[in-house]
Image (spheres, rainbow, N blue to C red):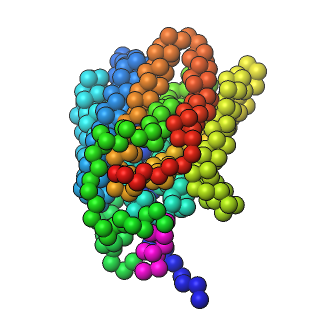
Amino acid sequence: MKHVIGKYRWTICTLLLFSTTINYMDRQVISYLKPFFCTPVEQGGFGWTNADFSYVTSFFTAFYAGMTIVMGWVIDKIGTKMGLAYSLIIWSVFGIANIFAGATVAAHVFIRSLFGLGEAGNFPASIKTVAEWFPKKERALATGIFNSGSNLGAMIAALFVPWCLTYFGTELGWKMAFAITGAVGFIWLFFWFALYDTPSKKKGLSKEEYDYIHSDEDEVQGNANTPQAKVSWTKLFKYRQTWAFFWGKFMTDGIWWFYLFWLPDYLIKQFGMTPAEVKWPAFIVYGVAIIGSVFGGSLPLFLINKGLNVYKARMTAMLIIAFVPLIVLITQYFGNVDKFGSSAMYLAVAIICIAAAAHQAWSANLFTTVSDMFPKKAVGSVTGIGAMAGGIGGVVVQLLAGRLTDAFKNNPQHAYLIMFFVCAFAYLIAWILMKLLVPSHKAITDL
């Protein structure tokens, strides 16, 4: 008779979904405060320039990038349970601390950088958790599900921050936006400590589900019950697999950061929308991206069931997905108000929806390549290295966006045309680099 496999691993995935939702909600708050921050002082704002705003987000991204490699190593060292908990506490505390920064750019840069220290731990811990709780064939789907929290968090921020500014007024509202979103994380901590542990320590986990989690032949030995030596992250740089993940993240993470931090600005400048009006188009973009995240995670499973091995299924899925963002090349054509009138905004947003969904589909698979190629004890460290690379790419993209929008202040559509060209080709270039570095699957066995 066929044994019934339990489903507790999906409870763990749900916890990761909510931590990622909180992570991105806290991160995204500042993008919906940009119009207020960049309003002239005489009109009640902070009087920041676009470059000032890009400095705040870029320093956050740079600090986030630098710390992910450290946080990945720390999480491999202390474990996922405490690693993710400490990370959330740090980012929540410094998210709230933004209320004390006032209008000073340097103060926001400093606090937002420390905020990045905590945020840096979410993905290394989450990817390591997926590797601990799921067999390889389900990891992309699990990653796609929890990674959709990045969209849920952005959707919540899109509605909540404008509401705060309206309900409390701009002078108090921007502070309340930071304070309330920062406080939510402490509620999640209760459920994390109550429900989470590694499979080998989790009481009540059925033997059938435990065996299923550890059913991959190349991972049966050295599973969670076997003590393992920790891996020095410096040793990981000698592997081409590490560099494949590094360049995959460097080339594409910045695109998502661009959609997160600059989409509201694009809608305001391209279509003359007010800050209150941009919340619904942004909400829709991030909502559609959830579909891409889950679909992207399920596509390799479909290909595996058709007979492809895990690596070939993963890379085939990523190649298919990499062609989709080319659609943003036509964003500015259909976003031309003179040509398409009031329909222009809807057409442009529809195109960006597809591109954002493609990014999330790509990301779900890219993250999973780490657990495909590396033993579980190194997953956190390698994910941290890749997140560092993605953060560096994010800094480059955001600084470029800031410089371009200032340079084309009178013609912002030109600045965004250039940015959409960057967004269009990043994924294909990343896929080519990854394939050149790792032409065929080879798991790391000598760590």
The stretch drawn in magenta includes residue 208: yes
Q: Of helix, strand and loop, which mostly describes the magenta segment? A: helix
Asked if residue 28 lies left or right of residue 337, the reply is left
Q: Position of residue 399 (x, y in %)?
A: 43, 21
Counting from the top left corner in percent of width and height, residue 393 is at 44, 29
Q: Give the magenta-colored segment's residue range.
A: 206-216
Residue, far bottom: 1
The residue sitting at 31% across, 42% down in the picture is 235
For residue 418, which quarter of the picture? top right
Where is 33 relative to 181, above or below?
above
Q: Answer whether residue 99 is visible to the viewer in this image.
A: no
Q: Is residue 444 left or right of residue 286?
A: left
How far from the left and from the top, in percent, is residue 171?
A: 33, 32
For the image, the number of numbered tags is 0
Q: Residue at x 43, y 59 (%)?
A: 130
Q: Specify whether residue 290 is painted magenta.
A: no
Q: Is residue 236 visible?
A: yes
